[in-house]
Image: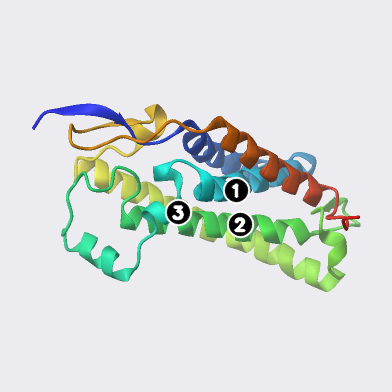
Amino acid sequence: MTTRPVKVWDLPVRLSHWSFVGLVFAMWYTSENSLWWWHTRLGVVLLAVLVFRIVWGVIGTRTARFANFVRGPSRIFAYLRGQHSKDEHIGHNPLGALAVIALLGVMLAQVGMGLFAGDPYDGATGPLNGFVGVLTADMLTDWHETFFYVVLGMIALHITAIGVYAFIRMDDIVGPMVTGKREAPHSVEGIESADWGRVIAALVIAAGFALWVWFGAPPFG
């Protein structure tokens, strides 16, 4: 069967994905080296990227939308039994969808705890620390530190799955996330180009929400 390269991932999805990689590493590095000025600011940047990806998952291109790849248990079990075409899922397959939701969820939880964590006497606090008491902030700080191992575990599971697909199933996942394209039969249709009006709208929403949080979530009006 002859194949041709088709577009499978738009630029916003790819930039979001690799931003997560860089930001999680940067968050770990700044924490390990007590660079709290950078740690808190990068945390808000990570929040903005997460919000952008969630908004883009609603209004983005076909493979970016959660409605396109998040499936119920029956579809997941059918995929596990091999009852699908290899090229049926040019984007995330049902298992990949679970990984996406899980990774977004744990990163949101980690960032959320960090927003309220910290000790004002040490000068290192999240922008929403003032909304909680000292005991609650201390508890969230401990959870924030411990929960990072959950984030690392999810990342390790994700990398393991990529290795399995690459070396056992001979299915390259990383390459398309770099180039945006993968080989597929001529019968498989690639995705449309990103609508840059929607990209800008998603960026405005994400940046606006992150700035609002950064300034302590002041009331409107």
Residue at numbered disc 2:
108
Within 10 Å of disc 2 (Cα), the crowding (few <14, some 14-19, many 20+) is some
Residue at numbered disc 3:
66
The three-letter code of the residue at mark 2 reads Leu
Q: Secondary structure at mark 2?
A: helix
Q: Residue at 47% across / 57% down in the picture?
A: 101
Q: Going by the image, does 14 lie left or right of 48?
A: left
User: Residue 143 at x, y = what percent?
Assistant: 66, 66
Q: Quadrant of the N terminus?
A: top left
Q: Residue at 82% across / 73% down in the picture?
A: 135
Whether pointer 3 and pointer 2 mark residues with C-beta atoms closer than 8 Å, the reply is no
Sequence-wise, the earlier of marks 3 and 1 is 1
Q: Going by the image, does 77 lie left or right of 143?
A: left
Within 10 Å of disc 3 (Cα), the crowding (few <14, some 14-19, many 20+) is many
Sequence-wise, the earlier of marks 1 and 2 is 1
Q: Is residue 166 above or below residue 125?
A: above
User: Residue 152 at x, y = what percent?
Assistant: 50, 53
The three-letter code of the residue at mark 3 reads Phe
Tag shown at residue 50 = 1
Q: CA distance from mark 1 to mark 2?
A: 7 Å
Residue 206: quadrant of the picture: top right
Q: CA distance from mark 3 to mark 1?
A: 14 Å
Which residue of the protein is positioned furthest toward the bottom in this rendering?
135
The three-letter code of the residue at mark 1 reads Leu
Within 10 Å of disc 1 (Cα), the crowding (few <14, some 14-19, many 20+) is many
Q: Residue at 33% across / 30% down in the picture?
A: 181
User: Residue 52 at x, y = what percent?
Assistant: 60, 44
Q: 47 or 8: nearer the eye?
A: 8
